[in-house]
Image (spheres, grey):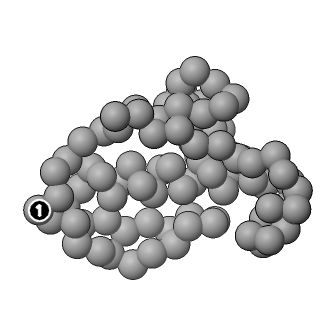
Amino acid sequence: MLLGVGSGWNREEMRNHGVGPTGRTARMVEAVQAVRQIWATDESEFHGDHVDFAPLATAGVDRCLIPVRSEDSDDLSTRLDALVAVREAFASR
């Protein structure tokens, strides 16, 4: 299985979903991080700038790491890792 994601390009659609053209990639990256955490653990909790949820049980769900691809990159995982590293570097200042 391969999951495809995109940050969007249609401004009217973005407006309808309450998302502006700036920040949409950060929102997408955080959503993918949250979903990957849910897929990887029996109990997930996530508190980000765009995605926020209290602990939820996912025990009994088959664990897997589905490859994620983006329209911007052959491997979104590489972009996610880079964006997380930059975000953490600035957060620690």
- Percent position of residue 84, x then y: 57, 42
Question: In the rendered image, which quarter contains the N terminus?
Answer: top left
- Percent position of residue 27, x then y: 66, 56
* Left-right relation of 25 to 50: right
Camera-side residue: 1 or 57? 1
* Left-right relation of 11 to 88: right
* Left-right relation of 46 to 66: right
Q: Quadrant of residue 46?
A: bottom left
Q: Residue at x 57, y 21 (%)?
A: 74
- Percent position of residue 11, x then y: 88, 56
Q: Residue at x 65, y 43 (%)?
A: 6
Q: Quadrant of residue 51?
A: bottom right
**As drawn, which residue projects farthest toward the top?**
74
Label count reads 1
Can residue 82 be seen? Answer: no
| Amino acid of disc 1 | Gly
* Left-right relation of 28 to 10: left
Q: Residue at x 36, y 53 (%)?
A: 37
Q: Residues within 10 Å of mark 1 (few under 14, many from 20)?
A: few
Mark 1, residue position: 60
